[in-house]
Amino acid sequence: MSSAITTPRAQRAESTMRWLFGIYFVAVGILHFVVPEGLPTFMAWMYELSDPLHAIAGTAEILGGLGLLLPPLVGLSPRLTSAAASGLSLVMFSAAAWHVSRGEWVQIVGNLVVAGVMAYVAVKGWRRQVGSPSSNTTLDESRLTPR
């Protein structure tokens, strides 16, 4: 069986990922603008990020998070979701590079995992939009039975 077949269960999982990461990115993006006192140790790096980087990262994360959340809610083009996921993947790769310069290995791994998930969401969305054979094809069990 080809990995190109998308089952309803896989579609739900992908939708859940978009929702969770959309909410996550909006929340973290807002944190870049308010940076509250008493953040957990693994987020202490936020205190050392420059104001311009906070503004760039925060804006990109808020817009990207909204790009994951809004298209299915208000009927916008699904291309926006793919573009948002692509942009967020780039943001997370950039964040990993920044953490490499500081030797913060736990954050690097987390950034790369999230970048990978966002790249997956983007690729799945682009494939679905161009109608490639490996796109969002539903499982047709009648085609699996020998003739």
Image (tube, grey):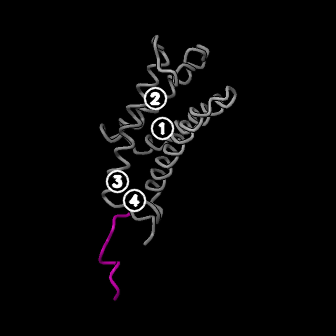
Q: Residue furthest front?
A: 41
Q: Position of residue 6 (x, y in %)?
A: 38, 61
Residue denoted by label 3: 11
Q: Nearer the viewer, mark 3 or mark 1?
A: 3
Instruction: Work out whether residue 79 or residue 144 is closer to the camera in this orientation and state it.
Output: 144
Dot 1 corresponds to which residue? 84
Circle 4: residue type? Asn
Q: Is residue 62 left or right of residue 7?
A: right
Q: Nearer the viewer, mark 2 or mark 3?
A: 3
User: Which secondary structure, mark 4?
Assistant: loop
Q: How far is mark 4 from mark 1, CA to CA?
A: 19 Å
Looking at the rendering, the stretch of residues picked out in magenta corresponds to 136-147
Q: Does the CB distance between marks 4 and 3 fall below 8 Å?
A: yes
Q: Is residue 113 visible?
A: yes
Q: What secondary structure is found at the residue carrying circle 3?
A: helix
117 relative to 95 in the view: left or right = left
Labelled disc at residue 63: 2
Sequence-first tag of 4 and 1: 1
Residue appearing at x 39%, y 43% in the figure: 17
Q: Earlier in the sequence, mark 3 or mark 1?
A: 3
Residue 106 drawn at (x, y percent): 57, 33
